[in-house]
């Protein structure tokens, strides 16, 4: 019954900001982390960032450090990705995912983010 639904994507000018949301449901089991990934046209999917379940510590890819921030609203069971100072190279389909044990087991359908120069 696990479902992850991303929203908030769209077209934004370089230097602008955007906040993505990931509404999760059915997370009745223990999990290690919730993360964001992205896939640009013609490229492999890459890790963007994640936040751990226990400590709430966040990790980020070098390409987005200082610009992106991951947060979680436990009461609303929602994961967020605040993206600032967006660059054209940030253009991609963004996915949220849940790591239950050793891998990210559940994935959303993704939301398109397009940054124009």
Image: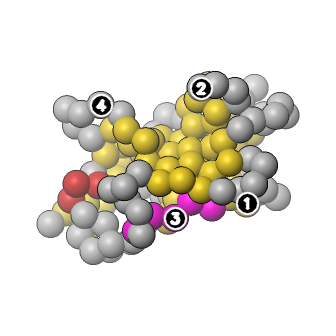
State the mark number for residue 103.
Answer: 2
Q: Earlier in the sequence, mark 3 or mark 2?
A: 3
**Location of residue 24 (image quadrant):** top right
Look at the numbered discs 4 and 3 and tell me whether their residues touch, using CB distance below 8 Å: no
Asked whether, in this view, residue 52 is left or right of residue 44, the answer is right
Q: Which residue is mark 1?
A: 73
Mark 4 and mark 3: Cα distance apart in space: 22 Å
Classified by dominant secondary structure, the portion drawn in magenta counts as strand
- Rendered residue at 59%/26% (across/down): 103
Q: Earlier in the sequence, mark 2 or mark 1?
A: 1
Look at the numbered discs 2 and 4 and tell me whether their residues touch, using CB distance below 8 Å: no
Viewer-nearest of discs 3 and 1: 3
Badge 2 element: loop
Instruction: Locate residue 64, reporting x and y percent.
Output: 37, 59
Instruction: Locate residue 69, reporting x and y percent.
Output: 52, 64
State the mark number for residue 44.
Answer: 4
Q: Magenta residues?
A: 67-71
Badge 3 element: strand
Badge 4 element: loop
Tell me the crowding category of disc 3: few under 14, some 14 to 19, or many 20 or more residues within 10 angstroms, Cα based: some
Q: Is residue 6 visible?
A: no
């Amino acid at each position: 019954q696990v479902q992850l639904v991303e929203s908030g994507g769209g077209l934004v000018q370089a230097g602008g900001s955007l906040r993505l949301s990931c509404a999760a449901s059915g997370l009745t089991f223990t999990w290690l982390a919730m993360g964001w990934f992205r896939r640009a046209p013609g490229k492999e999917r890459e890790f963007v960032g994640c936040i751990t379940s226990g400590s709430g510590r966040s990790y980020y890819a070098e390409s987005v450090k200082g610009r992106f921030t991951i947060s979680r609203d436990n009461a609303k069971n929602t994961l967020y990705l605040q993206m600032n100072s967006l660059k054209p190279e940030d253009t991609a389909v963004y996915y949220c995912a849940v790591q239950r044990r050793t891998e990210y087991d559940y994935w959303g359908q993704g939301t398109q983010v397009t940054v124009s120069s």
